[in-house]
Amino acid sequence: MIKRLLYFTIIIQISLGIMITASCKVKDEIDAPIADKIETKLTKHGDTRIDNYYWLNQRENPKVISYLEEENTYTEERLKHTKLLQDTLYKEIIGRIKPKDISVPYKDNGYYYYSRFEEHNEHPIYCRKKDNLNNSEEILLDVNKMSEGYPYYHVGDFAVSPDNKIIAFSVDTVGRRIYEIRFKNLETGENLTELISETDGDMEWAADNKTVFYIKKDEETLREFQLWKHKFSEHKDDVLVYEEADETFYISVSKSKSDKYIFLECFNTLSTETLYIPADKPDANFKVILPRERKHEYSVETHNGELYILTNKNAVNFKIIKTSLLNPGIKNWTELIPHNPEVFIEDFEVFKNFIVVNERKNGLVFLRIIDLTKQTQHYINCGEEAYELWISDNDEYDTEILRYGYSSLTTPVSYFDYNMKTKEKILLKEKFAGSDFKKDKYTSKRIYAPTADGKKVPVSIVFRNDMPINENSPLLIYAYGSYGYSIDASFIPSVLSLLDRGFVFALAHVRGGQELGRDWYEDGKLLNKKNTFTDFITCTEYLHQLSYSSPQKTFAMGGSAGGLLTGVIANMRPDLYLGIIAEVPFIDVVTTMLDESVPLTTGEYDEWGNPNEKKYYQYMLSYSPYDQVKKQNYPAMFVTAGLHDSQVQYWEPAKWAAKLRAYNTGSKPIYLYTEMDAGHSGKTGRYQAHEETALIYAFMLDILKSE
């Protein structure tokens, strides 16, 4: 699958040496901490911006830490009266987690792999069984034991050597997505002392059971830019295999489904270049399959000695071709699935006699099954108005069985085995959603909001059947809308706590994603970025017109790039929302994009534009939430951050919250809550991760109650 930048990293590393005093006024009622205003002038293209809170970017300054802790204390104290409600919500949410659970096993290289949870455990236990599921269990990694003593602990990935004797696995103990690769002897159970640091967390074994390929990150920018080769147990220095010189490109390493080839993919938001070596020749030089070209994206897989390539060469919505591995140039291409302007091809999976294509049409996902021997094809039928459908774990090549996943706003995540020949399917597992959950208590719909420029934005909605749905119904509307990342209508167990209290929940599939094809993405980026924000506003207004809610009952939510969206609409149309939840929001667009030393910034130029060019600078500035804060009545705000966030640095939401308070002419609260031991994705652990969810839900219900 073509890799895209689904998130971005924002860091501004400037040491001003300023002494900071963070104060908290004491009155009859607790006031928010007041951030010191220290004027910093930022000049570009003859334009000077004043940033009074620029000093908050000093992560190591104890007074900055103290200020963030005071903000947390303020939020907790102001919402202390909702503690009983928080506890109730938390118990409801974790009550939808099966205490003792196991994943659906998948087969790979003679073993069935799965993960399981024991009752009360926060983390998974990764296991396998040889040959069949009746054999004895072998524990690969017990993350509960491994994480003891760490406030944050995340296993990023693991890979077992081809002879099934050694497992390599990656660990992040901070939350900045910088992983150490460690090794364990699966025959003896011994944790080995070999360690590889500063990696992206992924690794691939060569066929010799000795060589491990991995990606290193740049220490400053965190860009994945070097491919290294480690010779396991030989105690030799690792060898640098490849270094990406273009600062707008990133690299990743993977293996073909046949395990015969190792791929090195170099990519940015618009271009791809893939190189390969035979897996049994780890010391060979990587060969380029197709040289990089501006605006040519592609991904590859091998099949019966040929290459199958998903490409957008002369195909906006992508097509699939096959070609020779030895001579893959365009003159040797044969179209397998031609371009269709009405259908966007996202991904594909190869089997010995079948190919499965993941397609999008009219905002919905379809799986097309092609029988390569009979030259016939058919689609898997889903039967709901809005849903999520995806290709799951399919490591076996010579099989008629496809493993896929399915979910909808009313259907918990489910996994199926589908016989591609007979069309029979078996439900392997539907995830537990609580002992009292009944699907028929809820209704899901797909509607289309008409925009001023003639587009129709899909909106997926869900509500409880026995609740009155009208202008007095509270509404939570969510969107993302960047990087071509599509938000599908999937089941969210925690949202049931809102639906059961009369909420309508809506997903706005705004431009900037690829729900309606590649053009939907192109029309929501660069100098078209404002379409993302106006689409969201249009969806909100349309829901109000249809009496699903009203401005006095509506909350908006988004995270990361979706947090940017919530920041923009807070400035543009604060009258449409009672409250806004901005989770780890990318909020200080211009300042961040002008600093080329920060993680992912130069690679983001194709998404947002390069502000070193005046036209992009002016356009970004016209919507940048931090720059566009003005004196007006803002909705109630709940803003989150992660101290160790490598995607959106904590100081962006911290600065924004301080500036919002300074400009807000209304009386609704503005809360900032920073996870001090976590990064972009918040806390790890299947239970503790929901503590913040319960806090946010309590915030919304409290605001509703106070109106």
Image (spheres, rainbow, N blue to C red):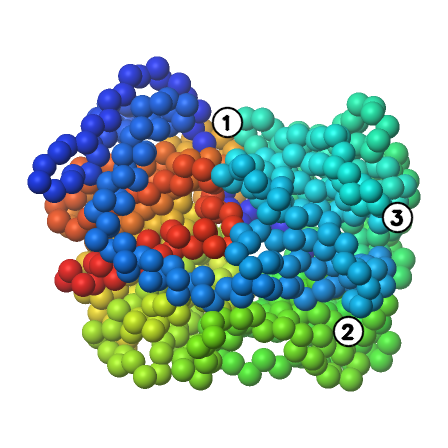
Q: Is residue 525 above or below residue 97?
A: above
SS for callout 3? loop
SS for callout 2? strand
| Residue 543 image-quadrant placement | bottom left
Taking the image as shown, residue 268 lies to the left or right of residue 207, namely left
Taking the image as shown, residue 518 lies to the left or right of residue 418, namely left
In 3D space, how far apart are the residues under numbered discs 3 and 2 (Cα atoms)? Answer: 25 Å
The one nearer the camera, 657 or 378, is 657
Q: Which mark is residue 220?
A: none
Q: In this view, does 436 lie above or below 85?
A: below
- Residue beneath the point at 39% across and 74% down: 462
Percent across and percent down for residue 26 are 13, 34
Residue underneath mark 1: 597
Total numbered badges shown on the rendered structure: 3
State whether residue 493 appears in this view.
yes
Quarter holding the C terminus is: bottom left
Q: Residue 401 carries which label?
A: 2
In 3D space, how far apart are the residues under numbered discs 1 and 2 (Cα atoms)? Answer: 47 Å
The one nearer the camera, 237 or 225, is 237
